[in-house]
Amino acid sequence: MSLEYFRQRDRFDFSKNTLDIGNYLHWNKKSFLKHFFLRIFATDASRWEEFYTRHLNYYLAKHEDGKEEDFFTHLWSLIETRLKTLVEKDIYESKNHVRDQQEIKHLKSLTGFLISIDKWNSHETEVEIIMRQQNQINTMQNKMDKMDKELKTFRLLETKDHINIPKGYVLTLVDIILQIQEQTIDGKIELAFAQTQAIWMKIICKYFTEDRQPIKYERIKRYFTPDPDDLSKSKFSPVPENKKLFKIIPAKKRS
């Protein structure tokens, strides 16, 4: 029964701005819907949230096991039924066409508010629900397809193989990589630029081994300074001279 969902107006409540249902004197509860819509049409659209909250709190206070979804669904059903009745009226037969159009506009304003807070999709028709679910499935499938492609690309680039360095020559590799970082094109653009030194260390540890054994990150960390211009700020160690076996020399330009 709708009286269980909406707060009734107190007797002798002469407030002109009340949001409660009924009049200030005795009224026939069997005519609830009439009074309900009188209140709806007398309420300014700016007060929809206030109207909704007031009656929701009333409903929840009266029903310990009450849920907002139940209240919302009931309210939506009342508004939807009245709106549908007005819209389906024959404009040529209706004597109250102007008033009907005003009421339709007012109810659409209310349904717009209700849709904006509808967490349960109560306003959707069965067809709309199916379409929404199908769209969600399509979206998920597209995401899965994208992830599958990314995974295939990752697996294509990933390898369990390693480039092996003879025992005792890891620092020779480090020296070569440090030299690569110093190379420039026409003395202006760095040949291989990285934001941090960590990426170079990760490359060595991930893709190289020394005598078939893993290369530990901490072992080579001190040879890669975060600030090459100020070696005093880091625990930096230069590569020993006896490990510097190669020197990268820019080739002469070819015409």
Image: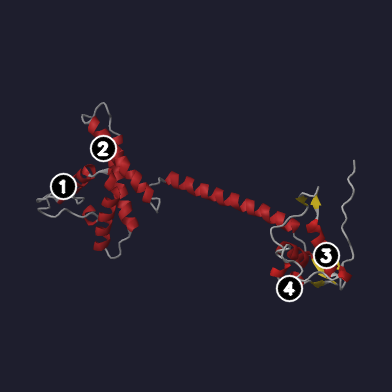
Tell me what residue is drawn at x 79 percent, y 52 percent: 184
The answer to which of 106 and 2 lies nearer the viewer is 106
Q: Nearer the viewer, mark 1 or mark 4?
A: 4
Helix or strand or loop: what does disc 3 sit on? helix
Amino acid carrying mark 4 in the image: Glu
Residue 239 location, x and y as percent? 82, 69
Does residue 143 lie above or below 105 as drawn? Answer: below
Q: Nearer the viewer, mark 1 or mark 2?
A: 1
Label 2 neighbour load within 10 Å: few <14, some 14-19, many 20+: some
Of the image marks 4 and 2, the number of the one nearer the N terminus: 2
Of the image marks 3 and 1, the number of the one nearer the N terminus: 1
Q: Nearer the viewer, mark 2 or mark 3?
A: 3
How far, Cα to Cα, is label 2 from label 3?
82 Å
The answer to which of 166 and 172 lies nearer the viewer is 172
Would you name the residue on which mark 1 appears? 16
How far, Cα to Cα, is label 4 from label 3?
16 Å
Amino acid carrying mark 3 in the image: Asp
Would you name the residue on which mark 3 appears? 175
Q: Is residue 176 left or right of residue 14?
A: right
Would you name the residue on which mark 2 appears? 103
| Mark 4 in CB contact with mark 2 (< 8 angstroms) | no
Label 1 neighbour load within 10 Å: few <14, some 14-19, many 20+: few
Amino acid carrying mark 2 in the image: Glu
Residue 205 location, x and y as percent? 76, 67
Residue 119 location, x and y as percent? 40, 53
Would you name the residue on which mark 4 appears? 218
Tell me what residue is drawn at x 30 percent, y 40 percent: 83
How far, Cα to Cα, is label 4 from label 2?
76 Å
Residue 162 visible to the viewer = no
How far, Cα to Cα, is label 1 from label 4?
78 Å
